[in-house]
C-alpha cells in the first residue's frame, strides 16, 4: 500500500514490430504538462481534487497552474477578462478557480418589485471579487451613453486568501458610508433568489474546552496552514504542540456541524416579518464598519484594463485595488483596525445573542451580559430605539408575553399587543425546495427560540432556489422578503437574435437629446422569447424606467411582437438625426402597452416592431405614432464609465420593500430629475 503499481503492455504494429509501454499511474506521470492540461479539460474540479489524493507525484502534477488555468477558463466561460492579472495577487489559479465556482452563478440581473420605477441590481466582475451595483433610474442627457450610468453599490463578494468568500453589504447611515460584514456560502447553479438573513453562530464549545489558546501566545506548526489562508503572525511557539492544535480544528469542525443542524431546525424565514426586519436592522447597526479612505476607492478596475488605458495607469489601478482587497479581508475577520475588537473573535459572526435578546425581547440579563455590553460598546440609554419594541417602563416580559404594569392603561396595552401579533404574523411561509409540509414546520417560531440557537448572530447572504411562478418572463415575488430575484436572461442565438438587455428612450430620432432640451427618461427592457399557441412571441419586459413618477408597473410588457407574422406597415420617419435614410430590415406585428383599467392592469394597442439596419429596434404605436427606440447595452462598460452615488441604509439598500411610485433612489442620493417625461408624452 502506498506504492505505485505499474503494468507493462505490448502492441503489435503494422510492420510486425512490438511496442512496449506502461499503463496505470506511471502513464500519467510520463505525460507532458501541456498534454495533461488538455486532458484535465475533460474533468471537473472535484475530479482533479480526488486525483491529487491518489499519490504524491499526481498531487504535484495536478496542482500545477497549467491545469487549473484550463479549469478557470471553463468555469468562467463569460467571466472576467483579466484573470491573468488576478494571478499576480493570489497564490495559484486553484484559488481563483475555487472563488469562481462560488460566485459565477451570482453574475447577472437581479430585481425586486418595489419601487415600481424599477429596482435593478447588476452583479458584475470586479477585481478578485463580484460587485452588486444598483442602477439608479435616470434620464439620458446630452452626452448620451458616453457619460455612463449612475449607480450605487449594494454588496460585494471578495476572494479570500484561500479562495473562500468574503461578503460585505453596503449602506449609509447619518450621511456616512459603512460596510457590513457577513457570511455567504457558494452559490449553486440553480439559485434564483438572494435572501438577506441573520445567521446564528455557536462558539461556546471552543471557549470552554480551549482556555489556554485564548490566554497564551502561540503559533501553529509551519506545515499547517490557517483555515482562512492568512499568514500566521510570528510569535512564541506554544506548549500545546501540534496535537492540541489538531484538537482545536476537530472541535471547530464539530461546532460547525452542530451549528448547521441547529440552523436548519429553525429557519430565519419562519420568523415574523416584524421580527426579521428588527433583527436585520439591529445586527447591521452593530457590525457596521466605517469605510476608511483606501476602502472608499474604486470597487472594480477601470474600463481601460486591457484596452486603451496606459499600462502604467492600469498597473497602478490594480495595486490600489489589491490594497483595498487586503484591508477588506482583514476588516471582515478582525473588525475596525482602530476600533474595538469583535467579542466573538470574528467580525462577520456578529453580536452576542444575549445582547439581541435584551434589546429585542427585554429578557433578564445574565451574569456575563454586562461584560459583553462593554466589549460591544453597548449603551443602555442610547440603545433604546424603535428596534426595542415597547418601553420597559410600561411593560414587562413574561413567559406568556408582554404584560402591562400599573402605569400603563388598558388601551395602550391592547395596542402594543396588536403590534406584536401583526409583527409575528406578517411573514410568509418559505417556499424553498425540500421544506417539510407537516403542520409543525409551518408554525411560526418565536424570536427567542431563534436567538438561542447560537452564541452570536451575524448577517448572511443566502443564495437560494425557490419555486417561482412567472408571468410573461417576470417572476411573481413575495412583497415581505428581503430578497432579490434573478431575471432569466436568454442569450442571442439563431432564431432568437433579439434576446437580451436593451435600453432606450421614447421619441425619434434616437440617441442624445440637444443640449438646450431636457433629458429623456431612460428605459431598460429585457427581451425574451416565449412559445404560445399562436407561435413565438418576443416579450419586452420593463425592469427600469427613468421617469420622475412611474408610468407602468414594474415587470410590465412594454410591447410584444409576433416574430412569425410580418407586417406591411411603413416606418413613419425617413431619416435619423444626421438626415441619413433609415434602412428597415424587417417589420413584425405586435401590441404595445397602453392605459387600461387602472395602474395595476394596463391595456394594449396595436403596433409594429421595426428592425433597423444599424442594430436599432423601434416599436411604433399605430394610433398615436409614439415610438420607443432601443439599442443593446453593455452594462459592465457603462457602469465603469459611470458615476457612483450615495446608497440607502443597509437593509433598504438591499431590498426596498416600501410601496413607492417615485424615484426614491435619486431622491436619497441628492440627485434631481428635471424635465422627466410626463404621461401624456410617453404613454400611447
Image (tube, rainbow, N blue to C red):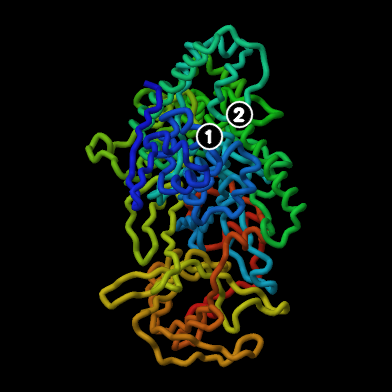
The crowding category of the residue bearing disc 2, from other C-alpha atoms within 10 Å (few below 14, some 14 to 19, many at least 20), is few
Residue at image position (69%, 78%) is: 517
- Residue 100 is situated, as x and y percent measured from the top left of the image, at 51, 45
- Asked whether 145 or 491 is in front, the reply is 491
Find residue 230 and name its label: 2
Judge depth for marks 2 and 1 and give the one in front: 2
Residue 377, relative to residue 207: is it above or below?
Answer: below
Q: Would you say residue 106 is visible in this rendering?
A: no
Residue placed under numbered mark 1 in the picture: 283
At numbered mark 2, what does the secondary structure look like: helix, strand or loop? loop
N-terminal of the two: label 2 or label 1? 2
Can you see residue 263?
Answer: yes
User: Of all residues shown, which one is farthest toward the front?
Assistant: 16
- Is 573 placed above or below 429 here? below
Measured as percent of width and height from the top left, residue 598 is found at 40, 71
Residue 27, placed above or below residue 667: above
Amino acid at each position: 500500500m502506498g506504492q505505485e503499481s505499474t503494468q507493462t503492455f505490448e502492441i503489435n504494429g503494422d510492420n510486425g514490430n512490438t511496442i512496449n509501454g506502461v499503463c496505470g499511474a506511471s502513464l500519467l506521470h510520463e505525460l507532458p504538462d501541456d498534454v495533461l492540461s488538455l486532458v484535465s479539460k475533460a474533468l471537473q474540479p472535484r475530479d482533479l481534487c480526488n486525483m491529487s489524493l491518489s499519490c504524491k507525484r499526481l498531487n504535484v502534477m495536478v496542482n500545477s497552474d497549467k491545469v487549473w488555468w484550463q479549469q478557470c477558463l471553463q468555469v468562467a466561460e463569460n467571466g472576467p477578462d483579466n484573470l491573468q492579472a488576478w494571478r499576480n495577487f493570489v497564490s495559484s489559479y486553484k484559488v481563483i478557480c475555487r472563488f469562481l465556482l462560488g460566485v459565477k452563478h451570482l453574475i447577472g440581473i437581479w430585481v425586486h418589485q418595489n419601487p415600481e420605477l424599477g429596482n435593478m441590481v447588476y452583479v458584475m466582475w470586479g477585481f478578485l471579487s463580484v460587485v452588486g451595483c444598483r442602477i439608479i433610474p435616470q434620464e439620458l442627457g446630452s452626452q448620451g451613453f458616453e457619460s455612463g450610468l449612475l449607480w450605487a453599490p449594494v454588496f460585494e463578494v471578495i476572494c479570500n486568501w484561500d479562495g473562500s468568500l468574503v461578503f460585505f453589504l453596503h449602506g449609509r447611515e447619518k450621511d456616512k458610508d459603512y460596510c457590513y460584514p457577513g457570511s455567504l456560502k457558494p452559490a449553486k447553479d440553480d439559485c434564483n433568489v438572494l435572501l438577506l438573513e441573520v445567521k446564528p453562530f455557536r462558539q461556546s464549545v471552543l471557549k470552554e474546552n480551549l482556555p489556554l489558546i485564548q490566554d497564551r501566545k502561540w503559533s501553529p506548526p509551519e506545515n499547517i496552514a490557517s483555515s482562512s489562508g492568512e499568514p500566521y503572525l510570528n510569535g512564541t511557539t506554544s506548549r500545546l504542540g501540534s496535537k492540541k492544535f489538531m484538537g482545536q480544528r476537530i472541535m471547530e469542525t464539530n461546532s460547525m456541524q452542530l451549528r448547521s443542524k441547529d440552523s436548519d431546525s429553525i429557519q430565519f424565514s419562519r420568523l415574523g416579518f416584524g421580527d426579521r426586519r428588527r433583527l436585520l436592522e439591529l445586527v447591521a447597526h452593530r457590525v457596521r464598519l466605517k469605510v476608511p479612505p483606501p476602502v472608499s476607492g474604486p470597487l472594480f478596475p477601470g474600463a481601460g484594463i486591457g484596452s486603451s488605458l496606459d499600462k502604467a495607469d492600469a498597473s497602478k489601478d490594480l495595486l490600489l485595488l489589491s490594497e483595498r482587497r487586503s484591508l477588506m479581508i482583514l476588516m471582515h475577520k478582525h473588525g475596525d483596525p482602530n476600533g474595538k475588537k469583535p467579542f466573538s473573535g470574528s467580525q462577520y459572526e456578529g453580536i452576542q445573542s444575549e445582547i439581541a435578546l435584551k434589546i429585542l425581547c427585554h429578557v433578564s440579563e445574565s451574569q456575563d451580559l454586562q461584560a459583553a455590553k462593554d466589549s460591544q460598546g453597548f449603551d443602555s440609554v442610547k440603545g433604546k430605539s424603535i428596534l426595542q419594541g415597547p418601553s420597559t417602563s410600561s411593560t414587562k416580559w413574561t413567559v406568556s408575553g408582554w404584560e402591562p404594569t400599573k402605569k400603563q392603561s388598558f388601551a395602550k396595552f391592547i395596542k402594543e399587543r396588536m403590534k406584536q401579533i401583526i409583527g409575528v404574523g406578517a411573514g410568509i411561509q418559505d417556499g424553498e425546495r425540500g421544506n417539510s409540509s407537516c403542520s409543525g414546520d409551518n408554525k411560526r417560531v418565536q424570536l427567542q427560540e431563534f436567538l438561542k440557537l447560537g452564541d452570536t448572530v451575524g448577517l448572511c447572504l443566502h443564495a437560494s432556489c425557490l419555486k417561482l411562478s412567472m408571468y410573461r418572463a417576470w417572476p411573481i415575488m413575495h412583497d415581505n422578503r428581503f430578497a432579490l430575484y434573478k431575471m432569466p436572461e436568454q442569450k442571442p442565438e439563431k432564431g432568437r437574435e433579439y434576446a437580451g438587455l436593451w435600453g432606450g428612450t421614447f421619441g425619434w430620432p434616437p440617441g442624445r437629446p440637444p443640449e438646450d432640451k431636457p433629458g429623456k427618461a431612460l428605459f431598460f427592457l429585457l427581451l425574451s422569447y416565449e412559445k404560445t399557441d399562436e407561435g413565438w412571441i418576443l416579450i419586452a419586459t420593463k425592469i427600469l424606467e427613468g421617469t420622475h413618477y412611474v408610468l407602468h408597473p414594474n415587470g410590465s410588457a412594454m410591447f410584444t411582437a409576433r416574430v412569425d407574422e410580418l407586417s406591411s406597415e411603413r416606418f413613419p420617419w425617413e431619416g435619423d438625426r444626421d438626415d441619413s435614410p433609415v434602412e428597415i430590415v424587417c417589420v413584425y406585428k405586435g401590441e404595445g402597452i397602453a392605459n387600461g383599467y387602472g395602474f395595476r392592469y394596463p391595456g394594449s394597442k396595436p403596433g409594429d416592431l421595426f428592425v433597423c439596419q444599424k442594430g436599432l429596434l423601434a416599436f411604433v404605436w399605430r394610433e398615436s405614432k409614439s415610438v420607443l427606440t432601443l439599442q443593446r447595452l453593455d452594462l459592465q462598460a457603462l457602469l465603469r464609465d459611470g458615476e457612483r452615488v450615495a446608497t440607502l441604509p443597509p437593509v433598504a439598500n438591499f431590498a426596498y420593500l416600501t410601496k413607492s411610485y417615485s424615484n426614491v433612489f435619486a431622491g436619497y442620493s441628492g440627485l434631481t430629475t428635471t424635465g422627466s417625461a410626463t404621461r401624456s408624452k410617453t404613454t400611447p
